[in-house]
Image (cartoon, rainbow, N blue to C red):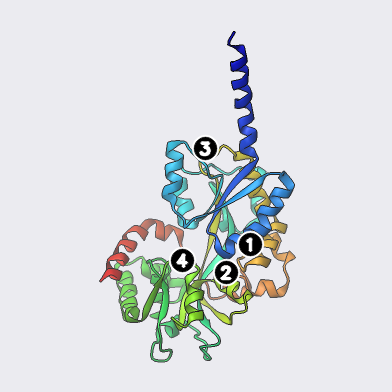
């Protein structure tokens, strides 16, 4: 007698995976990066799979992923995370392990891109930037950034220990190759904070990637640290902002799948597309972040290549962000920074 309701319930249950597959939720940091991803990845994926990609913007809150995974209510399928977060999240079991047989050959990717819990999405840099309309003599080194006599005015810095401590040591004469060796010592950390204290009266803090170009255009700061893609986006809008690549810190963002995503197969398809040479080349044309798939580089012209952190000229004096160092010492340094900034 109760067969019809049971059959109806089974029909609904069997339809659920289909409904889940009809859309894919992809989380990124928004802005120019989000717009470039939409063009290079979202649209081709939708066309190829007949599924809607829902883009969600966030600020890297790993607590949200942790809450979803622990409550077994995962609504995000693919998430862009920064390098310290892939390492930490993988250790905590927050991400699915990546099946490379469905994504691509590991040998096609820059070595730093290959991770058991995800794959490098792009290479980006935190660099020094200034307004070419307001500053005629370009700063060349981090010592110039600290020199408020030669270059009077405010300096924009991201509010946090990461990157700033490395830049402070470079400004104090530490060679790029020795930065983490020095910073790992008690005296080295002391030296970095002492150098930051020198600049403190001239610092204007930023917390969102959109702020540095806004500060430069408004004349609030004479130079600032910035994500190179944000400066690229402002240049595309006709702003005369410039980058000094010397001593820039490059890093990777990664694609991960939160543990328990109901759309794992679709998520893998998306990651595979976003890791392909054609899609990565298209992405690099829309924002100057470097491909992780080395085959994408052959599809880009000299002008595009020249604006990427991965170009030979720009990478020559660059420092690779040390994920292991920050995983080990980051918490203590960030606490010390917060106390120092509040003084």
Q: Position of residue 5 (x, y in %)?
A: 59, 17
As rendered, which of 24 and 7 lies closer to the eye?
7
Quadrant occupied by the N terminus: top right
Q: Nearer the viewer, mark 3 or mark 1?
A: 1
Q: Which residue is mark 1?
A: 36
Q: Which mark is residue 260?
A: 3
Instruction: Please report whichever mark, 3 or 2, sits nearer to the chain's N-terminal start.
Output: 2
Instruction: Please report whichever mark, 1 or 4, sits nearer to the chain's N-terminal start.
Output: 1
Above or below, 12 relative to 194: above
Helix, strand or loop at disc 2?
helix
Q: Which residue is mark 2?
A: 229
As rendered, which of 158 and 332 lies closer to the eye?
158
Q: Position of residue 269 (x, y in %)?
A: 66, 45
> Looking at the image, which residue is at 41% across and 66% down?
162
Instruction: Please report whichever mark, 4 or 2, sits nearer to the chain's N-terminal start.
Output: 4
Quadrant occupied by the C terminus: bottom left
| Mark 2 closeness class: few <14, some 14–19, many ≥20 residues within 10 Å | many
Residue 275 in view in this figure? no
| Mark 4 closeness class: few <14, some 14–19, many ≥20 residues within 10 Å | few
Q: CA distance from mark 4 to mark 2?
A: 13 Å
Q: CA distance from mark 1 to mark 2?
A: 10 Å
Q: CA distance from mark 1 to mark 4?
A: 18 Å
Helix, strand or loop at disc 1?
helix
Q: Which residue is mark 4?
A: 208
Residue 64 in view in this figure? yes
Instruction: Please report whichever mark, 3 or 4, sits nearer to the chain's N-terminal start.
Output: 4
Q: Position of residue 52 (x, y in %)?
A: 65, 46
């Amino acid at each position: 007698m109760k067969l019809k309701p049971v059959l109806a319930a089974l029909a609904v249950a069997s339809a659920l995976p289909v409904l889940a597959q009809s859309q894919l939720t992809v989380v990124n940091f928004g802005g120019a990066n989000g717009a470039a991803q939409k063009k290079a990845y979202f649209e081709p994926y939708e066309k190829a799979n007949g599924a809607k990609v829902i883009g969600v913007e966030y600020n890297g809150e790993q607590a949200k992923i942790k809450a979803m995974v622990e409550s077994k209510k995962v609504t995000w399928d693919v998430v862009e995370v920064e390098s310290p977060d892939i390492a930490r999240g993988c250790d905590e079991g927050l991400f699915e392990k990546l099946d490379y047989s469905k994504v691509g050959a590991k040998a096609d990717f820059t070595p730093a891109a290959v991770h058991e819990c995800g794959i490098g999405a792009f290479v980006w840099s935190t660099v020094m930037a200034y307004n070419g309309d307001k500053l005629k003599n370009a700063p060349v080194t981090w010592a110039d950034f600290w020199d408020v006599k030669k270059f009077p005015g405010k300096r924009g810095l991201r509010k946090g220990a990461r990157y700033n401590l490395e830049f402070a040591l470079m400004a104090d004469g530490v060679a790029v190759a020795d930065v983490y060796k020095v910073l790992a010592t008690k005296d080295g950390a002391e030296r970095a904070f002492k150098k930051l204290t020198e600049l403190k009266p001239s610092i204007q803090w930023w917390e969102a990637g959109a702020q540095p170009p806004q500060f430069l255009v408004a004349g609030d700061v004479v130079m600032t640290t910035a994500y190179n893609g944000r400066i690229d986006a402002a240049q595309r809008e006709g702003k005369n902002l410039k980058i000094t690549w010397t001593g820039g810190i490059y890093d990777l963002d990664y694609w991960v799948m939160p543990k328990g995503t109901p759309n794992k197969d679709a998520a893998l398809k998306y990651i595979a597309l976003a890791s392909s040479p054609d899609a990565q080349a298209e992405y690099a044309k829309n924002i100057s972040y470097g491909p992780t798939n080395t085959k994408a580089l052959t599809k880009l012209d000299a002008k595009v290549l020249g604006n990427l952190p991965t170009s030979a000229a720009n990478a020559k004096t660059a420092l690779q962000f040390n994920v292991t160092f920050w995983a080990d010492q980051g918490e203590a340094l960030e606490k010390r920074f917060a106390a120092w900034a509040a003084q």
